[in-house]
Amino acid sequence: MTATTKTAVSDTAAVQAAWATLERSVGPLAAIRSKREYERKRKLMNALLDEIGGDERHPLASLLDLVGELVAAFEAHEGPFPRFLVPLGGRTTLVVGLGVLMRKRG
């Protein structure tokens, strides 16, 4: 076992305590699995953006990166736009996207 590995393993209790404190403050930092979690993470992301601005050296910049990745992954899978069931070619089809919103609103 190298010194680096030994240090990382011996610090897991401290990391676990810090992680628990962080998650009590900002909620779970894991894959987003629901719209409710998505909305919470978007609010957190926006609050972090307000705090950090463009300062990449800000102490919370890495947290913003992580939260941004979680939000982006959810949006890539679920899409940030509402979903609609619309008649299309004689059958009902689930359509996702801004174009549908624009057509519905005229």
Image: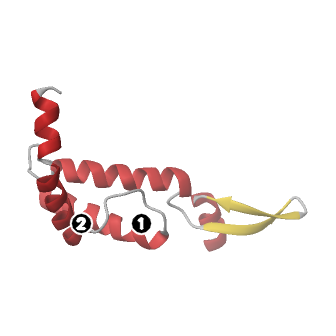
Mark drawn on residue 38: 1
Identify the image quadrant of the N terminus. top left
Q: Of marks 1 and 2, which one's residue comes earlier in the chain? A: 2
> What element does badge 2 sit on?
helix
- Determine which quarter of the picture holds residue 17: bottom left
Name the residue located 57 percent from the left edge and 59 percent from the top edge.
98
Q: Which residue is mark 2?
A: 23
Name the residue located 20 percent from the left edge and 65 percent from the top edge.
20
Name the residue located 23 percent from the left edge and 53 percent from the top edge.
64
Q: Does any portion of residue 62 appear in the rendered image?
A: yes
Name the residue located 31 percent from the left edge and 65 percent from the top edge.
28
Between the C-alphas of marks 1 and 2, the distance is: 15 Å
Q: Position of residue 16 (x, y in %)?
A: 19, 57
Q: Amino acid at mark 2?
A: Glu
Mark drawn on residue 60: none
Q: Nearer the viewer, residue 23 or 106?
A: 23
Q: Position of residue 50 (x, y in %)?
A: 17, 62
Q: Position of residue 39 (x, y in %)?
A: 39, 70
Q: Position of residue 95 (x, y in %)?
A: 69, 60
